[in-house]
Amino acid sequence: MNKLNERLKQMATYQVIDLESFPRKNYYDYFMATDTTFEMTVKIDVTSSS
């Protein structure tokens, strides 16, 4: 539970990014131009699904 609380604290803070010096600005611009409103990448184990 302690790791969860620590992770939640990290997620509650943020850092403003200077887009002009951001090394992945081209990726940011690409995805901001799409109609994507939410993205998430997760690992899913489907080896035992029925």
Image (cartoon, rainbow, N blue to C red):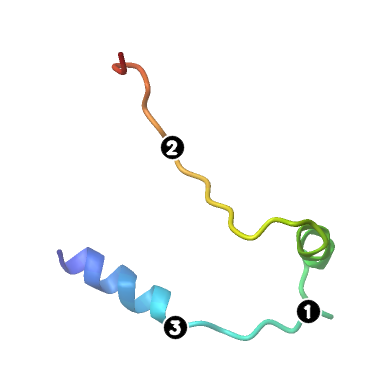
Residue 13: give its label.
3
Please, what is the three-letter code of the amino acid marked with disc 1?
Leu
On screen, residue 27 above or below 15: above
**Which residue is at the far left?**
1
| Residue at horizontal 40 percent and vertical 80 percent from the top | 12
Mark 3 and mark 2: Cα distance apart in space:
25 Å
Displayed quadrant of residue 36: bottom right
Left or right? Give the position of 2 relative to 30: left
Mark 1 and mark 3: Cα distance apart in space:
18 Å
| Residue at horizontal 51 percent and vertical 82 percent from the top | 14
| Residue at horizontal 83 percent and vertical 62 percent from the top | 33
**Number of disc labels:** 3
- Of labels 3 and 2, earlier in sequence is 3
Residue 49 pos. (x, y %):
31, 18
**Which residue is at the far top?**
50
Residue 44 pos. (x, y %):
40, 33
Please, what is the three-letter code of the amino acid marked with disc 3?
Thr
How many residues crowd around disc 3 within 10 Å: few (fewer than 14), some, or many (20 or more)?
Answer: few
| Residue at horizontal 41 percent and vertical 73 percent from the top | 11
Mark 3 element type: loop
Can you say which quadrant of the picture contains the C terminus?
Answer: top left
Residue 1 pos. (x, y %):
15, 64
Left or right? Give the position of 9 relative to 27: left
Q: Which residue is mark 2?
A: 43
Mark 1 element type: loop
Please, what is the three-letter code of the amino acid marked with disc 2?
Lys
How many residues crowd around disc 2 within 10 Å: few (fewer than 14), some, or many (20 or more)?
Answer: few
- Of labels 2 and 1, earlier in sequence is 1
Displayed quadrant of residue 21: bottom right
Between 20 and 29, the one nearer to me in the picture: 29
Q: Which residue is mark 1?
A: 19
